[in-house]
Amino acid sequence: MDIEWSSGTLLLIIDWIIRLAALCWIPLRTTSAAARSWLLLVGFVPVVGLPLYLVLGHPWLSKQRVQRQALASRVIREEQSAQSALRWRPGLGDGIGPEASALIERLGDFMPVHANAVTLLDDYQQSMEALLEDIDAATGQVHLLYYLMHDDAVGEAVVAALRRAADRGVACRLLLDAVGAKRGLRRYARQLRDAGVEVHDMLPGGLRWRRSGRVDLRNHRKVAVIDNDIAYVGSQNLACAEFVRGFPNRELVARVRGPIVAHLEAVFASDWFLETGVVLNVTPERPAQPEDIVAQLLPSGPAYPFPNARDTVQALIHLAKRKLVLTTPYFVPDDGTVNALRVAALSGVDVQLILSWSNNQRLTSWAQRAYYEELLACGVKIALYRPHFLHAKHMSVDDEAALLGSINLDIRSFALNAEIGMVCYDRGVVARMREVEADYLRDAEQLVLESWRRRPAWKRSLEGIARLADSLM
């Protein structure tokens, strides 16, 4: 007997086939939290949700990139074995240093090194002027690795400085994220190449995406290395403070000298190798600095076998005994980070979270508010900084360690982006960071649990719905 199917029946069958296939397949390829978000989307709109998951659901990188990162990690570890005199060997009285530094080295390849100088720059204009002055003083090479370069006054100034350096015979190389720096690449790439500057875009899309990875994986690092002598690492991009209109950024950048510069140069060389296949020479010898600050790098991203940034942040939270301050513009954490903050606060640690009152990403802003009540209830203090868009990313642990760089406290930084962090095991650096944090707090609004609970029900619902999409952001 012939069976006639109506179009509505066929669509219903296809919808349920997609839902069941997603239920069997998605949890095997991603974390439980991310799987719940994707299954919810597929459940509501199967014909949209499944194609989106196929494109954006699994944080895969090309086999070539994974192999190149493994090779770079091996070379970095081998080269460091010959530099044992630079290694910091913490003792039992060095607080969290022994545990933290051992974990970070296993996760991110780099050993802790002493004899560094670290200057924290929290004035946007000051840090950009310092970078341009150092480029203008360069005699050997300039290496810049940035997520974003805008076609604005800062972009023009950086391009002019690179062209002047290239005219002096300085070897200039520029790595820019293909999406974050799209406008800068379109505006400046040709003229820089014509001037002798080597320019490459990172994780390109279009017809080249299959050789890169999932289309929304990005290189979010901000690193500059000049003459193998001076380096910069932090949250600031190559753009004017108000490159997003209405959201003038406030940043924190470290200008460093000493052996840690060679490690930042190795990060640049690794990314250059990932993008081009070309191996750059990295000179390990750097003059010791009288400040003798201990520093350690944490590069992270999907090319590594473990989620470096997430594991390090959670470990530092758990290691805190007295005071913990975390600053981030985007706070959409995974369950492990929320649990770590809750346990720290309930254990008696003074936990302060500093976020930006304004936010240039509406969905992220809604989602992060859904976490406030749970954290406030267990004693975590939350302050919203008002004067600027607080784009700085850093944390201080007791009086012993400070972490700064490009790492946000969100799932994208933990699992999808290539990021860079620098940990300083130094009371002086922590004290300077505490001054910066105190300055934020003077212009911030501390949330109060009782007042926060009185916000309208429609806002609570909106925030809860946005939180369901945390793994999709």
Image (cartoon, rainbow, N blue to C red):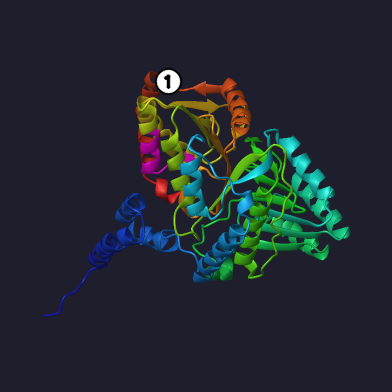
Query: Which of 457 and 178 lies nearest the eye of the viewer?
Result: 178
User: How far across and how far down the image is residue 296, in percent?
Assistant: 58, 46
**Residue type beneath disc 1:** Val
Give the quadrant of residue 423: top right
Most frequent secondary structure within the magenta stretch: helix
Q: Residue furthest left?
A: 1
Q: Quadrant of the N terminus?
A: bottom left
Q: Please give the name of the residue rendered at 59% of the width and 37% of the height, measured from the top-left corner.
A: 392
Q: Residue 368: where, in percent of width, then height?
A: 44, 37
Across and down, in percent, residue 186 comes to: 71, 59
Q: Is residue 236 left or right of residue 10?
A: right
Who's the residue at 35% across and 53% down the image?
41
Compared to residue 456, the image places residue 250 above or below, namely: below
Q: Residue at x 69, y 45 (%)?
A: 232
Residue 394 visible: yes
In the displayed structure image, the side of residue 465 where residue 359 appears, left or right: right
Residue 334 sits inside the magenta stretch: yes
Q: Quadrant of residue 49?
A: bottom left
Q: Is residue 271 above or below residue 433?
A: below
Which segment did they paint magenta?
331-342
Foreground of the two, 194 or 380: 380
Measured as percent of width and height from the top left, residue 285 is found at 71, 55
Where is mark 1, residue-wise? 448
Q: Nearer the viewer, residue 196 or 397?
A: 397
